[in-house]
Amino acid sequence: MTDFDPTRPFETVALASVDGVSEPTLRDALAAVQTAMEPLAVADIVFEYRRTFEPDPLVTRHGDAYYLAVPPQVWPEFAGVLEFAEPVVGACRTVHADCFHAVADDPSDGREPLVLVE
């Protein structure tokens, strides 16, 4: 069994400094988003999002990564729980969107990309 690497799906996009946020800070923030989900079980969160949000936020799944298009209020909730500064939230959103767009089309209805790793 390999070690859990919460940033693995994001390696398909170039992780570098984004919006003035350094690569190490960005990697830590991306990992924090994923590990915040760990105690709750990502599959359960995805199930709950699918029950709660219309239209169905699950766009696709590849291996252990879920590619979701979620309502705009989801990212501020993550930011509040994790106490991210706005530039870090923006950089995370950018990387999630880049990763999402590598496998799926842009949600055109105001929803935002979110990639969760199980």
Image: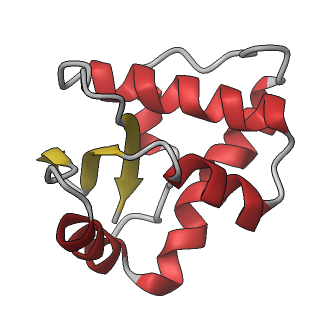
Q: Nearer the viewer, residue 12 or 108?
A: 108
The colouring scheme, among rainbow, by chain, secondary structure or one colour, is secondary structure
Q: In which image quadrant can residue 89 be found? A: top right
Q: As displayed, is residue 50 above or below residue 20?
A: below
Front residue (pair 31, 94): 94
Q: Where in the figure is residue 31, as x and y percent of width and height?
A: 62, 53
Residue 99 appears in which quarter of the rendering?
Answer: top left
Q: Is residue 27 left or right of residue 111?
A: right
Q: Residue 15's x, y, as percent? A: 60, 21
Tell me what residue is drawn at x 19 percent, y 55 percent: 54
Question: Residue 12: where, in percent of width, then height?
Answer: 38, 23
- The residue under the point 24% across, 20% down is 108
Q: Quadrant of the C terminus?
A: bottom left
How many marks can you see? 0
**Would you say 36 lies left or right of 8 here?**
right
Q: Residue at x 28, y 46 (%)?
A: 68
Q: What residue lies at 68% left-to-right and 27% top-to-bottom?
A: 91
The quadrant the N terminus occupies is bottom left
Q: Is residue 12 among the parts visible in the rendering?
A: no
Give the camera-side residue of 109 and 66: 109
x, y (%) of residue 61? Answer: 15, 48
Vertical position of residue 89 compared to residue 117: above or below: above
Task: Tell me, yes or no, if residue 40 can be seen here.
Answer: yes
